[in-house]
Image (cartoon, rainbow, N blue to C red):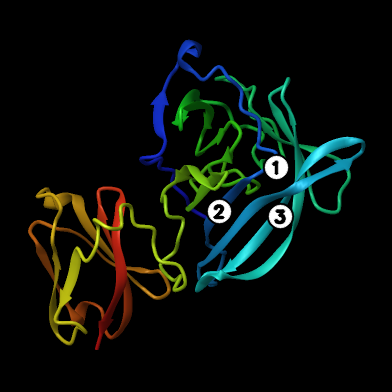
């Protein structure tokens, strides 16, 4: 699996190499009203094609195990063609905070003994311990510490090799997903608390192009309406994709076109108010597009090519 981590808009990354600038308040994992929504790209070995998964973890109450209180986690798997359809829902385990030690422990399903899930006490140069989500890389070392600013809070972030962990939230790969040791994993996730999006990696919408049931979230929808048009449409030979830009910096407007499997077919920045597409570059079928201004999704829809 391949992944790259990008923090956009909501969370301003402030790199700091001295302890005086790093978040001093420790934020434990939440005990209620939180969810982690994950879009994961899987690349199986051999000749098997890559595939997408869409799922989330939600807090589903608390429980006593071995006379200690834990927060229960439920995982919901969704149909990538319609995220309103739940394919399955099951108990994913339970965690507890050790606030004094700045650690989080986890009990997997059908087990009674806890294992370390996260250690947020690590400092630069420390060896990353083996945990539930790091069982393969005993040689990982902390490169540096920085902080992530989210809604008037600084969350401590511990960076090592191709991954990082964030206080009270989890790892680049997700809440329980295996940490990458030597190559970036590709996927994206969004973290919500009290129904508010606090942090995201790679894409604030956490939607996928194959999802026909949920429209892409568009900021200030009353402003960003019908910016993009296609003429003639359906495309039978050559058509023009035209935009009515809110600003004249055309290079910051980008269009991404995918086929219905999610494979990218075209990526282009605008140099004027229109670009040309040719049927011969696509073949026939139904394609999906997203129009971006910088890192904001302004519009999405379908392109039909005969």
Query: Does 60 sit left or right of 172 as displayed?
Result: right
Q: Is residue 60 left or right of residue 289?
A: right
In this image, 233 relative to 120: left or right?
left
Measured along the vertical axis of the image, is residue 97 above or below residue 79?
Answer: above
* Whether residue 144 is situated above or below residue 131 in the rendered picture: above
**Residue 114 can be seen in this image:** yes
Q: Residues within 10 Å of mark 3 (few under 14, many from 20)?
A: some
Dot 1 alpha-carbon crowd within 10 angstroms: few under 14, some 14 to 19, many 20 or more: few
Q: Is residue 289 in view?
A: no
> Residue 149 appears at what percent x and percent y?
44, 29
Q: Secondary structure at mark 2?
A: strand
- Between circles 2 and 1, the one closer to the viewer is 2
Which quarter of the rendered picture does the C terminus lie within?
bottom left
Q: Residue at x 59, y 60 (%)?
A: 55
Q: Which mark is residue 37?
A: 2
Quick one: which residue is furthest to the top in this view?
Answer: 20
Q: Is residue 172 placed above or below 263 in the rendered structure?
A: above
Residue 103 % position (x, y): 70, 28
Q: Are marks 3 and 2 in contact (CB under 8 Å)?
A: no
Q: Secondary structure at mark 3?
A: strand
CA separation in Å, label 3 and label 2: 12 Å
Residue displayed at 60% across by 43% down = 179
Disc number placed over residue 135 in the picture, else none = 1
Along the line of sight, the residue nearer the viewer: 62 or 295:
62
Mark closer to the chain start, 1 or 3: 3
Instruction: Name the residue carrying label 3.
Output: 74
On the image, the x and y values in percent for residue 129 come to 69, 30
Q: Earlier in the sequence, mark 2 or mark 1?
A: 2
Where residue 171 appears, x then y in whole percent?
Answer: 57, 40
């Amino acid at each position: 699996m391949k992944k790259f981590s990008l923090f956009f808009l909501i969370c301003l990354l402030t790199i700091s190499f001295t302890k005086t600038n790093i978040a001093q308040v420790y934020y434990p994992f939440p005990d209620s009203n939180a969810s982690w929504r994950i879009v994961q790209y899987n690349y199986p070995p051999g000749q098997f094609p890559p595939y997408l998964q869409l799922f989330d973890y939600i807090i589903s109450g608390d429980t006593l195990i071995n006379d200690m209180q834990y927060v229960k986690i439920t995982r919901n798997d969704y149909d990538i063609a319609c995220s309103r359809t739940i394919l399955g829902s099951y108990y994913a385990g339970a965690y507890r905070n050790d606030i004094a030690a700045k650690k989080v422990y986890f009990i997997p399903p059908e087990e009674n003994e806890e294992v370390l899930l996260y250690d947020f006490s690590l400092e630069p140069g420390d060896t990353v311990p083996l945990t539930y989500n790091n069982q393969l890389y005993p040689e990982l070392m902390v490169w540096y510490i920085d902080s992530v600013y989210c809604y008037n809070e600084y969350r401590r972030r511990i960076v090592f090799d191709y991954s990082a962990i964030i206080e009270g939230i989890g790892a680049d790969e997700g809440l329980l997903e295996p940490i990458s040791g030597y190559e970036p994993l590709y996927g994206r996730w969004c973290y919500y608390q009290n129904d508010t999006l606090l942090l995201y990696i790679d894409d604030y919408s956490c939607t996928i192009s194959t999802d026909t049931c949920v429209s892409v979230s568009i900021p200030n929808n009353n402003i960003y309406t019908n910016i993009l048009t296609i003429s003639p449409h359906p495309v039978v030979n050559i058509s023009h994709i035209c935009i009515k830009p809110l600003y004249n910096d055309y290079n910051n407007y980008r269009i991404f076109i995918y086929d219905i499997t999610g494979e990218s077919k075209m990526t282009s920045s605008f140099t004027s108010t229109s670009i040309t597409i040719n049927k011969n570059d696509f073949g026939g079928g139904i394609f999906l597009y997203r129009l971006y201004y910088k890192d904001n999704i302004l519009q999405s829809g379908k392109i039909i090519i005969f």
